[in-house]
Image (cartoon, grey):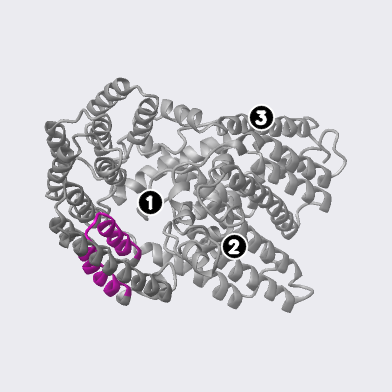
Amino acid sequence: MRLVGVASPSTFLLLITTLAGLAYWPGLSGGFLFDDYPNLDAMGHLGGVNNWETFKAFVFSGWSGPTGRPISLLSFLLDDNTWPSQAPWFKQTNLLIHILCGLVLCWATLLLVRNLKSVSENQAQWVAVLACALWLLHPYMLSTTLYVVQRMAQLATLFCLAGIVLYLYGRLQLAIRPRRAYILMSLGVVAGTLLATFSKENGALLPLLVLVIEYCLPKEGRPVWQWRALFLWLPSLAIVALLARYIDFSDNPWPNRNFNQIERLLTEARIVCEYLQHLFVPRIEGNGLYQDGYVISKGLFEPASTFFAITFLVAMLAVAFTVRKKAPLISLGVLFFFASHLMESTVVGLELYFEHRNHLASLFLFLPLAYYCVIYSARFKLLPVLAVVVLSLLASMTWLRASLWSDNDKLELYWVQSATDSPRAINAVAAHYMNNGDYERANDYLLAASRRLPHSSLLTARLLLQKVWVGQASEQDFIQAGERLKLQEFDAQTVKGIRTLVERVTGGNAASNSLEYARYSLNLLDTMESSPVYGQFPLFVRLVAYLRAQLYLHIGDAAQAYGYYSQAISRYQETDAALAMVAEMGNAGYPEKALALLEQAAQVLAQQDSRELKRSRMSYEQDITYLKGALREAMKTKNTATEIP
């Protein structure tokens, strides 16, 4: 095969990588989004990552997943070591990683086709380059690349690909250099899995993904069963067993979600079909990150599309197993896609919908198209022209999407237009109106949305926050908000909104009636805490004591503030949080009570596991010693001042 005007596969690959860089270029000027902030602002909390203590605190204290994802956090230090920072620096690195993933995918595909032994070397190279081009230029990959924090998904993909390359290369060496082959294959599976998993947890699927590849390759050249059992089957079964522990078909396994496990599985069938639709019929932009309004499947026919989605997916799997011998690459593309979704699209109680879950899953999905395009190009002369047209369209769509991603405000407004049932999207629109000084419009918009989505606690909290923000909230507004929140569905964003409200009431820019607002807020917290909805969430239970302490401190009731700070420290059991509360009490002019809280913070430090500390234990002990001295000195100064007639 020879594409139009291109002499060799290597030249075409160079053109494709250059085109990918150009297509993504407009989006590099965009800003940070959503989860970028909580994942990266720790650099600022630490005063910059500039020594071992702050390095350890940032890299090894991640919260995004069970592993903490230290490799991903480490990679962010390539771009900056403090916060606030410049998003384009991070996005440029993400683009380089995306291109690197494409190049490694090209290598993996070439080795895969060589293992298949069904085409010539020249054809194998063209298949690899074309498959890489379809994936690299696809607009669906853009959100993973230009959403800074999704470098986690990128790195998991990169290390999985590196492991697959070593495995496939070693497999080709089995017949001539078996010892070297087994070393390479073992290194690929073990190191690739570890590096991918500590970038993002779905990297633990690598042994299963390699097993899928092996299932679709000829038996000739296969590693011995003992090696496959140890390096592929056992890790894969371990992952399946781990996921099986999450199976819980009770009515309410995840109180913080508005769906149960059966509903999640039914809904994911529709979502996976939607992923496939957007991969094979791409569009410039979708609902983006506002997917919280996605319609939940309540049964096989609620909605009816659930049944058809399940039927379609079952048929796909049946075809994949049926055609394995005659069309192994079709089987590979389908089975690899399903295996990659095993962790994020099944029984774990994650949010329902994210495009980035397809970054790894879609790696070999376009391989059959590339393969048959190459082998039939001699018979159908227009196929190379068609391939160039398709790639040009993909690059154009990616460029248009990148242009939209270059402006956060335009991007979010675009998302909310198609996410009319998303409370988070509605919240963003209201915030946009408020930021532009149009309070009445923001208020009317939220009132209408609340009537349409009466179960959304986020909209209730947002409406109250807006009224507080402009100083127009009444006691009745607080009472009504509390009664609604008491009955509405839990949303972690709602808890964040209540915290923002308290910060507004107690902050330096508080309204003149902030003391009244503080008392109303205390009653609001009482109502929420009495609710069976909020009382079962550790996130709220910990936070409510802390918020009460802040409110009482603002009112001037130091005794009540001290009691709730003490309660909050006991609930958090985290040294940094405890020291922050000590500082708040001390800065408010109550050194004796701050000193008592400091003793409690010292006890928390003594009990906290060193692995959970963000700095060395000695560093915290030095801080506590310093604070004791400062607070005792403040007590002396205060006592002296009161003795002066």
Residue that label 3 marks: 396
Residue type at mark 3? Ser
Circles 3 and 2: CB distance less than 8 Å?
A: no
Mark nearest the camera among 3 and 2 is 3
| Label drawn at residue 210 | 2
Q: Mark on residue 122?
A: none
Q: Of the residues under marks 1 and 3, which one precedes in the sequence?
A: 1
Q: Are marks 1 and 3 in contact (CB under 8 Å)?
A: no
Instruction: Provide the major secondary structure of the magenta segment.
Output: helix
Q: Which amino acid type corresponds to the residue marked 2 in the rendered image?
A: Val
Residue 315 spot, x, y in % from top left:
48, 44
92 left or right, relative to 253: right
Q: Is residue 481 above or below residue 61?
A: above
Q: Quadrant of residue 443?
A: top left
* Figure quadrant of the N terminus: top right
Most foreground residue, 512 or 38: 512
